[in-house]
Image: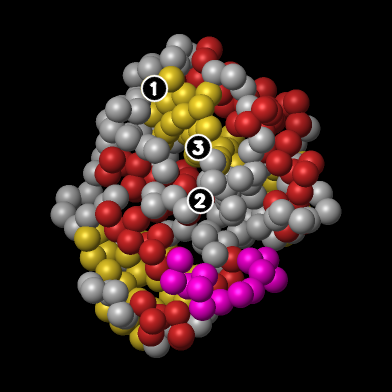
Amino acid sequence: MRIYISVDMEGITGLVDADDVQPGGRDYERGRLMMAEDVNAAIRGAVAAGATDITVNDAHGPMRNLLPEALHPAARLIRGKPKQMLMLEGLAPEHDAAVFVGYHSRAGAPGVLSHSFMGHEIEDMWLDGRPVGEIGLAHATAAAIGVPVTVLTGDDCACTEMTEWDASVTTVPVKYARDRFSADLRPSQEARAAIEKAVAASLSVPPKAPAVAAGPSTLTVRWQSASVASTLLGIPGVTSADSRTVQAQGPLPGLYRLFGVWMRVAASLTNQPPYC
């Protein structure tokens, strides 16, 4: 059984602030070790369920957060950037299931460190008219590749967002949001035991094939900056909804890869910290 694990950082056990998740932050070094412990719990669960091939993708920020020496030896690590498939780099139809560890809620939604991909640079996103963030877009893209998402871990708001998107996904809340930078923390050992148990249970039965939307999808993104939107209009197929909103149509996962290009363009035009 081949398992794919995508690991973000904002939804990791114990982490609540930008200083916990940004390189150079006063608690970042502790945060990256906490990140490793959550993903190791997921790996242990996958191994207990019979996984023989486990790929972990470091999907947060610089994508060099996980220390290879801190990772469970049963898994291989994809590390660094650029990655054309972003948070899903390395995901392939041959994988039997995907697990999302440490995910967070979308921009504007309640939740610890909530945002969509680029901090406040992205104000809103929609996939086929449905509000979407990192959770929904990654889930829809995985489905298009043919891989079901079986477990998501994060704060309670991220878990609710996942359930609203796909109620069949098992969710594990590791903390409960009090505000964007505060949470009621689940004890670390308890949270990791819950992650391990959920992953093992979800993989103990053959994952069901994911439902895939027919035809092309439409991705719409509203940026904080009109400069980003106007620059993106130079990319073939990108159209304008208003001065700060662009959209494009196409099949997933190609549309997800195109969105990665949009973010690289946006990053070249802006230089602001992601959590303000």
Residue at (70%, 55%) from the top-left corner?
A: 22
Marks 2 and 3, how far apart at CA: 9 Å
- The residue identified by callout 3 is 78
Mark in front: 1 vs 2: 2
Quadrant of the rendering where the N terminus is positioned: top left
Residue 88 x/y as whole percent: 42, 44
Residue 2 badge: 1
Q: Is mark 1 on a helix, strand or loop?
A: strand
Residue 89 x/y as whole percent: 42, 43
Query: In the current view of this chain or complex, which residue is farthest to the left?
Result: 215
Amino acid carrying mark 2 in the image:
Lys
Task: Name the foreground residue: 102 vs 75.
Answer: 75
Residue segment shown in magenta: 264-276
Identify the mark nearer the N-term, 1 or 2. Answer: 1
Amino acid carrying mark 3 in the image:
Ile
Residue at (66%, 35%) from the top-left corner?
A: 67
Residue 81 badge: 2
Residue 83 x/y as whole percent: 44, 50
Query: In the current view of this chain or complex, which residue is farthest to the right?
Result: 26
Task: Name the foreground residue: 194 vs 4.
Answer: 4
Question: Is residue 265 in the magenta section?
Answer: yes
Residue 166 x/y as whole percent: 40, 43
Q: What element carries label 3?
A: strand
Q: Can residue 151 be seen in this view?
A: no
Circle 3 Cα neighbour tier, 10 Å, few/some/many (<14 / 14–19 / ≥20): some
Q: Is residue 226 visible?
A: yes
Up/down of 137 relative to 93, above or below: below
